[in-house]
Image: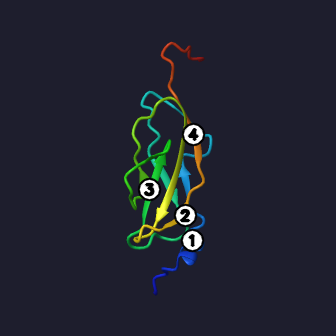
Amino acid sequence: GKEVTSLKDLKRGYQDFAIIHPAQDQVFAGMGNEINGVGWDTRFALQEGMLVTVYLDGVAQEPTSSPVVEVGRLDRGAHEVTAELRDRRNRRIATAPPVTFHVRQHSVNFPVRR
């Protein structure tokens, strides 16, 4: 099929580009402070040369076409993640609505109810 390159058509096709993990206001509690990466999705497969850049607390991660972006350990507290989809000419096609999530560490001396 013919590749769509008009910016208007691309923006329309990928307007559902969004972060699907973590969920809005999701709370992660655990020793490792791992959120198992940031996952994004869109209805159509990415075209050749398209890359996604995830921004964690405003810091750009490595652009990738992988559907899950590893972000490693995080400090406790609120974090915001968003993402940009760009085509091979580096034009911005879509921006994912920001997702805020929370990291809580288990307190070691917190009594466990049985």
Camera-side residue: 16 or 32?
Answer: 16
Marks 4 and 3 sit apart, C-alpha to C-alpha, by 18 Å
- Asked if residue 98 is positioned above or below residue 114 in the image, the reply reads below
Residue matched to label 4: 101
Rendered residue at 53%/46% (across/down): 81
Q: Mark 3, residues whose alpha carbon is within 10 Å: few (<14), some, or many (≥20)? A: some
Q: Position of residue 33 (x, y in %)?
A: 45, 32
Q: Amino acid at mark 3?
A: Thr
Rendered residue at 42%/51% (across/down): 69
Residue matched to label 3: 53
Marks 2 and 1 sit apart, C-alpha to C-alpha, by 6 Å
Mark 3 or mark 2: name the one nearer the start of the chain.
3
Q: Position of residue 94 (x, y in %)?
A: 54, 64
Whether the residues at callouts 2 and 1 have beta carbons within 8 Å, the answer is yes
Residue matched to label 1: 11
Quarter of the figure with residue 88? bottom left
Q: Amino acid at mark 4?
A: Phe
- Asked if residue 111 is positioned above or below residue 38 in the image, the reply reads above
Q: Position of residue 7 (x, y in %)?
A: 53, 75
Q: Position of residue 90 (x, y in %)?
A: 42, 67
Mark 4 or mark 1: name the one nearer the start of the chain.
1
Residue 94 got which mark? 2
- Asked if residue 63 is positioned above or below residue 92 in the image, the reply reads above
Residue pushed farthest bottom? 1
Mark 2 or mark 1: name the one nearer the start of the chain.
1
Q: Amino acid at mark 2?
A: Ala
Rendered residue at 40%/47% (across/down): 70
Q: Mark 2, residues whose alpha carbon is within 10 Å: few (<14), some, or many (≥20)? A: many
Rendered residue at 44%/59% (across/down): 52
